[in-house]
Every structure is written in C-alpha cells, then in structure tokens.
C-alpha cells in the first residue's frame, strides 16, 4: 500500500533541490555543472521563474560559502537569456531597498556582496558597483551622525571588497584608490575608546582582540598589498570569463541610503574574538592557520558566522553545513576556526545574538559529526581559556562557566580535573577558583548534587557548594515568635480558613517594642511558615505561595515590609540559590513585591547576597528583564488598541460587534497610565541600580587609596564588568535617561576610574 | 475538533517533555529549561498508582519565544544522561500528569 503511494517530487521541488545542491558534489568540473544546471533551468523559466529566482537568492544568502557558484549560475542564465539577468538584478535591487528601509542590516551586507560578485559573472557592470560603493562611503560624510551608522556602511563596503578588489584594481584603479583613501580618511577619524567594554580579555593575551572594523580594514589593506589574492573563495566564473563577457550587463539604478531615524537600530560595534594561534595547532597537522591580519582569516570566519546566523532554526542542518565547509577547505584548519567562532558568539558582549542554548547544542552536534577530532579541539581550547582566566571579563567568564557545565552535563560530567590542580593554590576569590566553583554549582544543579560530587576528585571538593538546603528560623524553641509560628504551621497543615490563620498571626506579641518591630516579626514568621509548608519541591513552594498570597499581601503594604519579606526569603534559602531566585521572581509576578524593593534589598540589606555571586547578578538581571518586558508589553497593547481605534474613525456604531469607540478610548487612557507607571518604574530601577553600583565602586576605591592597597581586586573587576555590560545591554533605555545618568550617577564628584565606564558606554553610541 | 487543537498548539507555551529518567527531579528540569527563558510551572508525570515520577513532564513558559527555544535546542540533548524529547503541547489539563508508569 505504501509503495503505491511513493511520494514523487514535483517538478518545482526537483528544481529547488537541484539549485540547493549545486556544487555539493565535487565530481566533474564545477563550471560545467553550473552550465548544465542553467540549461535545465532555462526551459522551466516560463512556468517556475519566480520560484527559481527566489531559491537562487535564498541559497546565495544561506550558503554564503557557495555564493560565487550562484553568481556564476545567474551569469550563465544571463548569457543565455539576457532578460532573466535583468529581472534578477531588479529583484535584488528591490530587496536591497526594502532591507535598507527596514533596517535589516545583515541582509544589506549579503545583498551588496552578491551584487558585487555579479560583476565577476558579468551580470552587473563594474561601473555600477563603483557608484554603489560611492553611495555607501558618502554616509561617512554626513554631519553629526552616530558612529554606528557610518561604521555599518563602511563595514558593508569593506566586506564586499575581497570579491571585486582584483577587478577594480585592473580596470578601475583610479576609482578604487579614491574609494580606499576615503575609507582610510574615515578610519583615522573614528574613536574606539569603547573597546575595553566589549573585549573578552582585558589584555592582549592569549591574542589581541581587535575592533571588528579596524581589523577588517587592516585585512583589506594587506590583501591589496598582496595583489588582491585570497585562498578561500571558489570562483567558478573565472574559467568561463570569455563566454560570460559576451553577455549583456545590467546597470544598477541609483540607490539612496535612507537617512538616520530614531528607529534605525544599527548593530553595535564588536570585537573579533581570538583564542588560537599557529602555535596552538598540532605541529604534525599540515594546514596552517591564516594569520590574524590575513584576508583568509576574515573570509573563513565570515563564512562560518553566516552559516551559524542563517541556520538558527535547525542546529543539525547547521552542523552539517559547517562540516561541508570543514571538508571542502581541508587545506585550512577550519575545524579549529569553527570552535573559535562559536566561543566568540557565546562570549559576545553585551549579549550573544541568539540563545546560548543554540550555540551549546550546535557544539554538541559538531562533536557527534566529527567525534574523532572536534572533542579534542574543544578540550584544547577549554584549557587555553581556563589558563587565561586571570584577565578575562567576568561576564564572559560566567558565560564560559555556563557553557562548560552545560556541555559536561551532556557527556556524563567526564572531565580530567587533575590537570587544573594548580588553581587550588590560587586565592579562593581568584578567577580560576571562582570559575571552578561556578561550574561545580551549575553541574550539581543540572545533575544531582549527590551524583556530581562523587565525580569530583577529593582535592577539588572544597570548591563544591553545599547541597541545597533550607533554614527554617522558627524550628526551635527560644526564638522570638516560635509559638506563633508553630501554631501557624499546624493550622496551615490543618487547612483552616485564611481568616483563622490571620487571627493566629495577629496573636504575635512582642511586649513593649514598636509597631514597626511587630510588623517585621509578623512578616518574618509568615514568610518562613509559608516557605516551610512548601519545603518539598519547587511546585510545592509555588503552591504554598499561591495559597497564602492574600495573607502576605495584607502585610506587605510598605516598602519596609517588602524588605523584611525579602530578608526572610534570603534567610530561608541561604543555601538554595536556585529557589531563592525563583521565589523572588514569583513574589513579583504575584504582585507582592516590586522590582524597586528588590534592588534596594540587594544593596542595602544586612544579609544581601555577595556582589561577586551569581545569585546577586541573577536577581538584578531578572529584575531588569521583567521591568523592561512589562513596559514593552504595555506599549505594544496600547499601540494595537490605537490602531484599532484609527480604523473605526468616523464610525459611531459598534466596531466588530464588541467594542464601541468610547470603550476603546477608555482603554487607551487606562493603558497610557499604565505605560507611564511602568516607565517610571523602569527609570527608577535602572537608575537606582546604577547609583548603588557606582557608590559601591567609589567607596571601594577611596578605601583602597587610603590604605594604599591595590584596588583591582576580583570584587572590583566583577562589579565593573557587570555594570558596563548592563549599561550596554540596555543602552536604548539608558540613552533616554542620559541626563539623569550623567548628573545623578556619573556626576562630577565620582572617581575618574569609575567615570571611565560611562565614557566607554558613550563611545559605543 | 482538529482545527481547535491546531489553534491551541499555535498559541501554546507548554511543552511535553519525554524520555526522562525516573530519578530526574523538578529542580533539574527547572535548571535546564530555564536556560531557554522563565518557566511558569513544571508538572511532573506520575505513575497512576504509585504516584511517583514516571519519565515525562510538562513545562509551561511565560512566553512563547522561550518555549520555542526549548523545542529547538533542548530536544535531542541530554538531561541526567538521557536524551530528552520535547514537543509542543496543547496545554496541560488536570489528570494528564498520570502516565501508565
């Protein structure tokens, strides 16, 4: 039965598959394969033109390592039927225009590159590309614009040059020289004082980590010096040159770069992550690593990055595609470079472009595809990174710990810790010890603490965090409030009505002490009792919080009461950071605690978490993210309703039968108030955090100066790195408050070393 | 109605997670799945008679985007030494936590 229904590919599907696979098979001459494909496609054009063209464009973008194969294919089609070439160019121009208006920066880059390469396939005349480049470089002359804007268009131009530099040099030398000198002029004007905020390492070890645009400029200049030669790209149009030249080229129309608007969120500057050098490669392996300033290093890194960026939906397909490149370019150590690029993504500051789980699971797929080599390379890079932890950025170190424990959890926590035994001689708060502790903590949470701790060698055991435990303050007689707590827990277990529980709690007596002290004790008792009742699993805990929410709500009217509650939660979960964080989040979502109080508690309470702990930053980060998301959500709702109202203008009757105009206007008013409220909260939370962090840093600096001790401690570096990261991650928010940020946070009296953080932040924008 | 079911799946923020070890705890599930985004709740699959974990659970997120990350990147990787399977679920209803054990 099944055989009868054997699935036949439709003609359209067959054509798509042929286009996708062209060049994958290494048998026969590539240029012949491409010409045969063109011969197959031409007669199908009448019926499937749109699909064929869209597929070629998609493939050129997704399989960027095969881009020139697709350029040649278009060239071959154009040679046979010039109108196809023309239509194709029109389509690309339409795409480019829309990518420019919609701020789709990565598409702009790949489209400009594809158009450039089409000159090699004689589909587009060289003069058109020169004009396009002139248009791009003109952006750098615009007065008073953000460096982000001029950087991006310069980057687009530079990243296309490796494809056409040689042609330009031969046929348009004057124009090329003029272009390069314009770029050179721009490059010398740029400032890169933000670099320390974006680098993984605060030193040139293990390898210098340069500004992306700066490095690309050096690489292009070096390529020019070497006669525009490279050793990476497949250029199947070269052998076809005389044939292709007979075809008609299609001049590009003038492209206008849309002016700067507030919505143009240009990509932030970035640095090029490096962790391998020639000496790290095993000496007996043939291929040699292109030097840092070689264009080949850029081209391979760019191919790998594009594949990773365009396959986020399917990690297996991504790994497969990377494997194709590793095998095709076997004369180069692409496997090493893939691992380096993946670490670069994971460590990107302020935040990686995609979920860390993507990069983590992709690494696992690569290990599966290349079991003999990839795990060995990873191990070597992990060792290099670990040996350089002393000057690594703390945010990066935390990501490293995250990735490493996740990776270990997929391989039975198998790791030879003994080779890292030297770190046990370092100070307990030194980065290597801090890192191992972080990894241990995460591993004991992902696996079970019991199982994981058995795998840890004895000498490393002191770095293990104790197993999750809770601390119920009212367990033993003698503590003030013991009786009430005991009765409360019993009543909770007996499922008595909430009013009765309230009566029990109201029976708390503290003699002559103040009302405030009474409140503090009541909040402490109630919080402890609820957590104690739910002290079995996370679900039990959340159920208890839900069940007794109204009792807490009644007590938590003032900010002080909220701080007492947070302190009680902190006491109860002192040895369970996972639940500590989850419970705080739940309290906010249940509208018992607000984010502002959390920030205050984090910095002022006597039992606040250690500033260098993961817990502290987890709590801060989730507060920031909640505040930000809830504001965005409100703004989105408001926008939607406003749109709905606009559609109904002029009609007094019911809109889609449910709401009338009046009702929508009320809703708008309500939401506008909510947006106002949320943005006040956001401003307060973001600025107060900043103020607290700066105060802490300044007071540390003045103490160190007075005592004459070194101020660059683990504590100091950890706070500086995290502060910078928060500022940049939320730069769009902070920019709105730049006045307050400048005057209230980084004002005149602040230590110059701390003001440096602000200067770097400003440098990025 | 299959259309309603499709609609529920499209809106869903809940995943069905299968092939877990019987010893895997809720804490471990929170730890792994929180890497994709904030988890709203985890419902452990229980043996109908013994009321002990029996190798599956439901994970509900606050946001669809987080659930989608988990489906794409956690599916087929390991938790507690077992390759877990994640699938979209139309949403948890009381009673569905009881498996055959």
Image (cartoon, coloured by chain):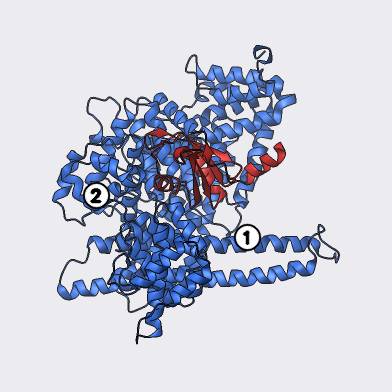
- Badge 2 marks a residue whose secondary structure is loop
Chain B: drawing colour? red
Q: Distance between the residues labelled 2 and 1?
A: 45 Å
B5 up-or-down from A265: above or below: above
Would residue A165 be visible to someone looking at this image?
no
Task: Mark 2 vs mark 1: tell me if same chain.
Answer: yes
Query: Where does label 2 land, which residue?
Result: A464
Residue extending farthest to the left is A425
Dot placed on the residue nearer the N-terminal end, 2 or 1? 2
Q: Could you tell me residue A167's position as x and y percent?
A: 49, 34
Tell me the subunit letter for badge 2. A
Quarter occupied by the N terminus of chain A: top right
The front one of A93 and A678 is A678
Query: Where does label 1 land, which residue?
Result: A636
A58 up-or-down from A3: above or below: below
Chain A: drawing colour? blue
Residue extending farthest to the bottom is A512
Residue found 49% across the figure and 55% down from its top: A150
Task: Determine crowd level at label 2: few under 14, some 14-19, many 20+ residues with C-alpha closer than 10 A.
Answer: some
């Amino acid at each position: 039965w099944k055989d009868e229904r054997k699935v036949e590919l439709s003609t359209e599907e067959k054509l798509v598959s042929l286009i996708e696979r062209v060049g994958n098979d290494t048998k026969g001459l590539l240029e012949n394969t491409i010409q045969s494909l063109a011969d197959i496609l031409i007669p199908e054009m009448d019926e499937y033109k749109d699909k064929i063209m869209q597929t070629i464009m998609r493939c050129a973008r997704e399989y960027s390592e095969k881009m020139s194969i697709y350029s040649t294919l278009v060239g071959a089609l154009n040679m046979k039927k010039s109108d196809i070439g023309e239509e194709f160019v029109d389509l690309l121009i339409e795409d480019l225009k829309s990518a420019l208006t919609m701020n789709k920066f990565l598409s702009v880059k790949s489209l400009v590159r594809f158009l450039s390469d089409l000159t090699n396939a004689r589909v587009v005349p060289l003069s058109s590309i020169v004009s396009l480049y002139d248009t791009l470089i003109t952006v750098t002359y615009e007065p008073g614009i953000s460096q982000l804007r001029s950087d991006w268009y310069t980057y687009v131009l530079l990243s296309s040059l490796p494809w056409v530099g040689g042609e330009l040099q031969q046929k348009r030398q004057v124009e090329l020289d003029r272009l390069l000198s314009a770029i050179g002029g721009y490059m010398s004007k740029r400032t890169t004082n933000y670099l320390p905020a974006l680098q993984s390492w605060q030193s040139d070890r293990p390898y210098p980590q340069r500004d992306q645009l700066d490095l690309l400029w050096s690489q292009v200049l070096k390529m020019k010096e070497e006669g525009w030669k490279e050793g990476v790209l497949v250029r199947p149009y070269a052998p076809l040159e005389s044939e292709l030249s007979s075809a008609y080229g299609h001049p590009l129309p003038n492209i206008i770069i849309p002016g700067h608007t507030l919505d143009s969120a240009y990509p932030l500057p970035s640095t090029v992550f490096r962790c391998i050098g020639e000496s790290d490669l095993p000496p007996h392996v043939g291929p040699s690593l292109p030097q840092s300033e070689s264009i080949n290093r850029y081209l391979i890194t760019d191919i790998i990055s594009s594949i990773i960026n365009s396959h986020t939906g399917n990690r297996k397909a991504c790994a497969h595609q990377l494997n194709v490149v590793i095998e095709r370019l076997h004369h180069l150590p692409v496997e090493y470079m893939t691992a380096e690029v993946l670490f670069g993504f994971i460590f990107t500051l302020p935040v990686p472009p995609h979920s860390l789980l993507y990069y983590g699971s992709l690494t696992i797929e690569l290990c599966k595809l290349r079991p003999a080599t990839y795990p060995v390379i990873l191990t070597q890079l992990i060792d290099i990174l670990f040996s350089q932890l002393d000057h690594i950025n703390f945010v990066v170190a935390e990501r490293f710990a995250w990735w490493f424990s996740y990776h270990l959890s997929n391989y039975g926590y198998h790791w030879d810790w003994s080779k890292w035994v030297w770190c046990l001689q370092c100070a307990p708060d030194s980065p290597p010890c801090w890192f191992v502790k972080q990894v241990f903590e995460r591993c004991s949470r992902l696996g079970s603490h019991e199982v994981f701790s058995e795998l840890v060698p004895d000498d490393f055991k002191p770095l293990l965090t104790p197993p999750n435990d809770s601390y119920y303050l009212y367990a033993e007689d003698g503590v003030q409030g013991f009786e009430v707590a005991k009765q409360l827990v019993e009543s909770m277990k007996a499922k008595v009505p909430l009013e009765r529980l309230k009566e029990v709690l109201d029976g708390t007596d503290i003699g002559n002490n103040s009302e405030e002290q009474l409140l503090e004790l009541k909040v402490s008792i109630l919080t402890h009792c609820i957590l104690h009742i739910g002290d079995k699993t996370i679900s039990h805990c959340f159920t208890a919080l839900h069940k007794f929410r109204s009792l807490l709500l009644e007590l938590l009217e003032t900010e002080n009461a909220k701080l007492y509650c947070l302190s009680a939660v902190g006491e109860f979960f002192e040895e369970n950071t996972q639940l500590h964080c989850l419970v705080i989040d739940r309290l906010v979502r249940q509208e018992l605690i607000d984010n502002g109080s959390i920030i205050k508690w984090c910095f002022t309470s006597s039992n606040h978490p250690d500033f260098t702990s993961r817990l502290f930053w987890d709590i801060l980060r989730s507060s920031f993210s909640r505040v930000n998301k809830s504001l965005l959500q409100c703004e989105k709702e408001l926008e939607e309703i406003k749109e709905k109202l606009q559609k109904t203008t002029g009609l007094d009757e019911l809109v889609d039968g449910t709401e009338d105009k009046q009702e929508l206007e009320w809703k708008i008013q309500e939401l506008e108030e909510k947006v106002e409220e949320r943005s006040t909260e956001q401003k307060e939370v973001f600025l107060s955090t900043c103020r607290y962090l700066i105060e802490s840093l300044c007071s540390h600096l003045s103490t160190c100066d007075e005592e004459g001790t070194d101020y660059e401690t683990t504590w100091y570096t950890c706070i500086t790195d995290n502060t910078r990261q928060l500022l940049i991650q939320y730069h769009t928010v902070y920019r709105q408050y730049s006045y307050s940020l400048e005057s209230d946070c980084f004002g005149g009296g602040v230590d110059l070393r701390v003001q440096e953080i602000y200067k770097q932040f400003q440098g990025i924008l | 109605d299959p259309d309603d079911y499709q609609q529920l799946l499209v809106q869903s923020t809940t995943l069905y997670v299968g092939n877990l070890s019987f010893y895997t705890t809720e804490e471990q599930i929170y730890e792994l799945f929180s890497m994709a985004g904030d988890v709203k709740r985890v419902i452990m699959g229980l043996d109908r008679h013994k009321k002990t974990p029996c190798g599956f659970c439901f994970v509900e997120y606050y946001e669809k985007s987080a659930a989608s990350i988990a489906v794409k990147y956690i599916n087929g990787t390991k938790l507690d030494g077992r390759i877990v399977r994640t699938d979209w679920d139309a949403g948890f209803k009381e009673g569905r936590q009881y498996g055959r054990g």
